[in-house]
Image (cartoon, rainbow, N blue to C red):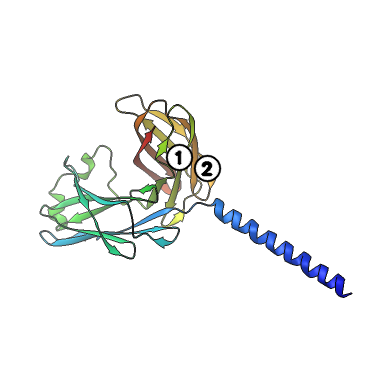
Amino acid sequence: MRRRLLFTWMALLVVAMLAACSNNDEQAETPAMLEVKLDVPDHIELNKAATLACVVTYGGENVDDASEVKFEVWRHGDGEREMLEAKHDGDGRYSVEKTFTEAGTYSVVAHVTARDMHNMPKKDIVVGQPEQAANGPDASSLDDEKGHHSSVAMSLLSHSFEAGKPASLVVHLTKDGQPLTGATVRFEIWQADNKHEFVDAAEKGNGEYEAAVTFANQGTYSVKVHVEGSGGLHEHQVEQVTAN
């Protein structure tokens, strides 16, 4: 009787260990994602220093050693863009101070590179009084930028590929901090002034979308991620990748 009871307990222990290993394997197969949350005011006063900041996390943990954090700032209708280097404040937070001297609607994009991943969240802000902003350049004059705050974060899982060989181009999408599912995703790919190629991506689950591509030549390519979804969602973001 004692021997049978011991055998039963050993069998249960083996089953529990196998289940734990299985769970660990499943968790290991789900890659952690680079998340960037912008901390930028909706409205900024003229001629007063304002703080532009973001909080960077990877797999839910603060990232205090990002390779690069910069803020790109431009006024709608202007061709000139400013790239500001951010400083690390601790606890995954990066910031920069800027004084706006002209009223109008501005776009702020945080360019964050960490853990071999890149994320570029964007937000539009108003500088000065509404009537002052209305007298500034018209936001509709932008040819390729949207005049609203996108809540969709896009992150390519890899920015480096082998030239001339089939590869998987994968983007991870989140909306309001949650994986975006059920979207229609296309990759627009081009190199320098060459022809643009459009490739449809298939949904893998958990906010990931994948397409089979081949970067024929060595060098830098531009990849524009087009995302469409319910509720009139239509966003896009341009990333740079390298084929070696």
**Amino acid bearing label 2:** Glu
- SS under mark 1: strand
Note whether residue 42 is visible.
no
Q: Which residue is mark 1?
A: 185
Decide: few, some or many residues near mark 2? Use Cα within 10 Å; few <14, some 14-19, many ≥20: some
Pointer 1 and pointer 2: residues touching (CB < 8 Å)?
yes
Q: Earlier in the sequence, mark 1 or mark 2?
A: 1
- SS under mark 2: strand
Q: Which residue is mark 2?
A: 203
Query: Going by the image, does 207 lie left or right of 73?
Result: right
What distance separates the C-alpha of mark 1 from that of mark 2? 8 Å
User: Residue 137, relative to residue 35: is it above or below?
Assistant: above
Image spot of residue 146 (x, y percent): 29, 44
Decide: few, some or many residues near mark 1? Use Cα within 10 Å; few <14, some 14-19, many ≥20: many
Going 60% across and 54% down the picture, which residue do you hit?
25
Note whether residue 98 is visible.
yes
Image spot of residue 176 (x, y percent): 41, 57
Residue 130 or residue 117, whichever sits in front: 117
Image spot of residue 212 (x, y percent): 50, 33
Query: Going by the image, does 191 lie left or right of 166?
Result: left
- Quarter holding the N terminus is bottom right
Q: Please identify the quarter of the rendering in which residue 223 is found.
A: top left
- Quarter holding the C terminus is top left
